[in-house]
Amino acid sequence: MDGANESNSSPVNRSKFFIGGFLIVAAIIYLIVSSTKANAQYFLTVDEVYEK
């Protein structure tokens, strides 16, 4: 029963939490950036507007 009362705020658990959170945030940022680059069109020329 001694191990059952260990606190969850140990340095190892805290570092795992921060690493996991960082990976999730990094994945979200990567998806946003890659999607934006794939779909971005900065401007249309006058001729391109008339063609559409």
Image: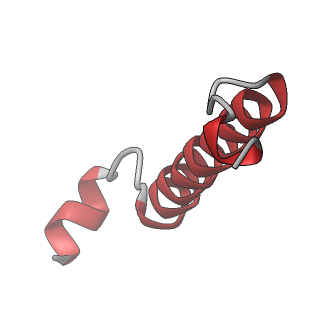
Residue at point 61% right, 55% down? 27
- In this image, 51 relative to 18: left or right? left
Residue closest to the eye, 49 or 10: 10
Q: How is the image coloured?
A: secondary structure
Residue closest to the eye, 11 or 45: 11
Q: Residue furthest bottom?
A: 52
Residue at point 36% right, 46% down? 43
Q: Residue 22: x percent and y percent?
A: 67, 38
Q: Residue furthest right?
A: 12
Q: Residue 50: x percent and y percent?
A: 15, 67
Residue at point 42% right, 55% down? 40
Q: Residue 6: x percent and y percent?
A: 69, 34
| Residue 41, image quadrant | bottom left
Residue at point 71% right, 28% down? 14
- In this image, 17 relative to 48: left or right? right
Q: Residue furthest front?
A: 1
On screen, residue 7 above or below 28: above
| Residue 8, image quadrant | top right
Residue closest to the eye, 46 or 23: 23
| Residue 48, image quadrant | bottom left
Identify the image quadrant of the C terminus.
bottom left
